[in-house]
Amino acid sequence: MPRNKSNPKKKLKTHRGAAKRFKITGTGKIIRMHSGKRHLLGTKAAKRMRKLKKLTLVNKADKLKTMQMLPYGL
């Protein structure tokens, strides 16, 4: 099928790994899961594990790079 000549600009692609790891809220904040829940769990306190279950915001230093990987949001 021939390419559309009226709009030759390429579409931006979403980074599929980032799409599985991050979510964008209605207000534009980016949330992610905590790390450190896969192994060596015996040394981690129950209180620490409860805190790791909760979602957290992406650091503002990483926000720009994350937004570039998710050009259309989710």
Image (spheres, helix red, strand yellow):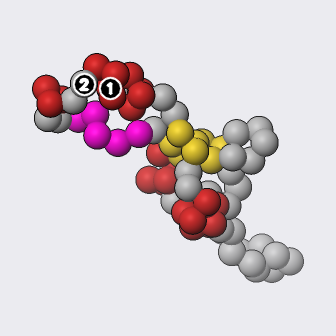
Q: Position of residue 68 (x, y in %)?
A: 62, 66
Q: Which mark is residue 13?
A: none
- Residue furthest to the right: 6
Q: Position of residue 58 (x, y in %)?
A: 56, 51
Residue 68, above or below 30 = below
In terms of secondary structure, where does tag 2 sit?
A: loop
Residue in the image at 21% along x and 29% along y: 44
Q: Which residue is mark 1?
A: 49
Q: Quadrant of the N terminus?
A: bottom right
Q: Dot 1 surroundings within 10 Å: few (below 14), some, or many (20 or more)?
A: some
Q: Main secondary structure of the magenta part?
A: loop
Q: Dot 2 surroundings within 10 Å: few (below 14), some, or many (20 or more)?
A: few
Q: Amino acid at mark 2?
A: Ala
Q: Which residue is mark 2?
A: 45
Foreground residue among 16 and 37: 37
Q: Position of residue 34 (x, y in %)?
A: 41, 39
Residue in the image at 24% along x and 24% along y: 45
Q: Quadrant of residue 5?
A: bottom right
The mark tally for this picture is 2
Q: Are marks 2 and 1 in contact (CB under 8 Å)?
A: yes
Q: Amino acid at mark 1?
A: Met
User: Which residues, given as a range, are shown in magenta?
Assistant: 34-38
